């Protein structure tokens, strides 16, 4: 075979390899968040399922059941209304916003006045009580940090550029004196008006009841709590021998169960599934799920790192 012919064949093979490589790179490029979001097309919110895991990471792209949805604004600390029809989050201007599941039909519930950091909203549903002539209520509770001091704030969920008010966490008439400042990480997943929150200064998780009267009490040592949908259990984070473990405790119990006793990584930001049987949590390598019973080890379900939440 002549050197010229050999060179032409080698060149031909190289060209084929280059073409395949270019095609491969093109396919990889289509997996960008923008392309994935565009693939949803006109289906919008109707094409998104309920009772699925979602992950927000401070960008405009939210992962919903493995699909990337473009909210067309920065999304921080996204969570959901109890029925899953509305998302609530903090936008890039630190305003409190609700929208449809695909990010459309945005409403600014409260506009940040400036000089404050707002974070970690949660949707609180309080049932009505006819005998006491108390109507059903739906509020958004979140953290407002001003001048280095954090407080829990609340505002009706149907407000439009409304004015939030401080949420009092009094211990009640016979309850203990509880801190009104330094409180963070509220979660009101229960439909009975109950919420939980944490205070880093005391290293404590508290439970707060807004049904008949506003009152709070100490639950356990820990941080980043989440309440089960039936309001009976709380999952939270507690540091054990250098790692963040997940603990679950009944609201009427005095002892907590370690769900990750052999942890070799940090499990943080836990949340309950809508049926209350599964917990999702953040790790440095993605989101894991595990049964509330602790019968199985955590399993990675997505490598996307961010705040997990379940759309009900």
Image: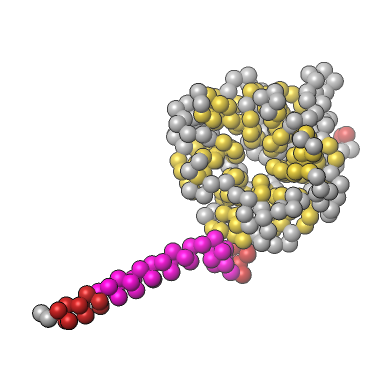
Who's the residue at 71% across and 34% down the image? 184
| Residue 231 located left or right of residue 167 | left
Looking at the image, residue 219 lies above or below residue 121: above
| Residue 80 located left or right of residue 157 | left
Most distant residue in the left direction: 1
| Residue 239 located left or right of residue 75 | left
What is the count of numbered marks?
0
Foreground: 214 or 63? 63
Residue 27 image point, x, y percent:
43, 67
Who's the residue at 57% across and 67% down the image? 38
Foreground: 1 or 34? 1
Looking at the image, residue 86 lies above or below residue 13: above
For the question of whether residue 209 can be seen, the reply is no
Most distant residue in the front direction: 3
For the question of whether residue 297 can be seen, the reply is yes
Who's the residue at 56% across and 26% down the image? 239
Residue 260 colored magenta? Answer: no
Which image quarter: residue 181? top right
Residue 180 image point, x, y percent:
80, 28
Who's the residue at 75% across and 44% down the image? 118
Residue 124 image point, x, y percent:
74, 41
Residue 1 image point, x, y percent:
10, 79
- Coloring applied to the structure: secondary structure
Name the dominant secondary structure of the magenta segment.
Answer: helix
- Extent of the magenta region: 13-41
Which image quarter: residue 149? top right
């Amino acid at each position: 075979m002549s050197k010229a012919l050999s060179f032409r064949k080698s060149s031909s093979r190289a060209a084929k390899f280059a073409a395949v490589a270019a095609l491969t790179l093109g396919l990889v490029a289509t997996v960008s968040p923008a392309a994935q979001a565009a693939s949803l097309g006109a289906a919008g919110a109707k094409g998104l399922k309920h009772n699925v895991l979602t992950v927000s990471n401070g960008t405009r792209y939210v992962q919903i059941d493995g699909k990337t949805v473009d909210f067309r604004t920065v999304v921080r600390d996204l969570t959901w209304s109890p029925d899953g029809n509305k998302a609530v989050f903090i936008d890039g201007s630190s305003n409190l916003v609700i929208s449809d599941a695909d990010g459309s039909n945005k409403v600014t519930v409260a506009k940040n006045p400036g000089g404050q950091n707002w974070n970690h909203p949660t949707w609180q549903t309080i049932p009505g009580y006819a005998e006491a002539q108390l109507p059903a209520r739906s509020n958004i509770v979140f953290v407002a940090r001003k001048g280095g001091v954090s407080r829990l704030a609340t505002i009706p969920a149907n407000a439009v550029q409304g004015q939030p008010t401080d949420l009092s966490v009094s211990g009640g008439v016979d309850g203990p004196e509880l801190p009104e400042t330094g409180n963070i990480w509220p979660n009101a997943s229960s439909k009975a008006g109950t919420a939980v929150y944490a205070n880093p200064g005391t290293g404590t998780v508290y439970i707060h009841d807004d049904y008949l009267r506003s009152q709070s009490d100490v639950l356990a040592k820990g941080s980043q709590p989440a309440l089960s949908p039936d309001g009976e259990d709380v999952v939270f984070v507690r540091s054990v021998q250098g790692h963040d473990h997940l603990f679950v405790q009944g609201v009427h119990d005095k002892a907590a169960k370690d769900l990750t006793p052999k942890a070799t990584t940090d499990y943080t930001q836990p949340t309950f599934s809508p049926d209350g049987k599964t917990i999702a949590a953040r790790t440095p390598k993605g989101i894991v799920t595990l049964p509330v019973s602790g019968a199985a080890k955590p399993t990675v379900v997505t490598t996307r790192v961010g705040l997990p939440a379940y759309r009900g």
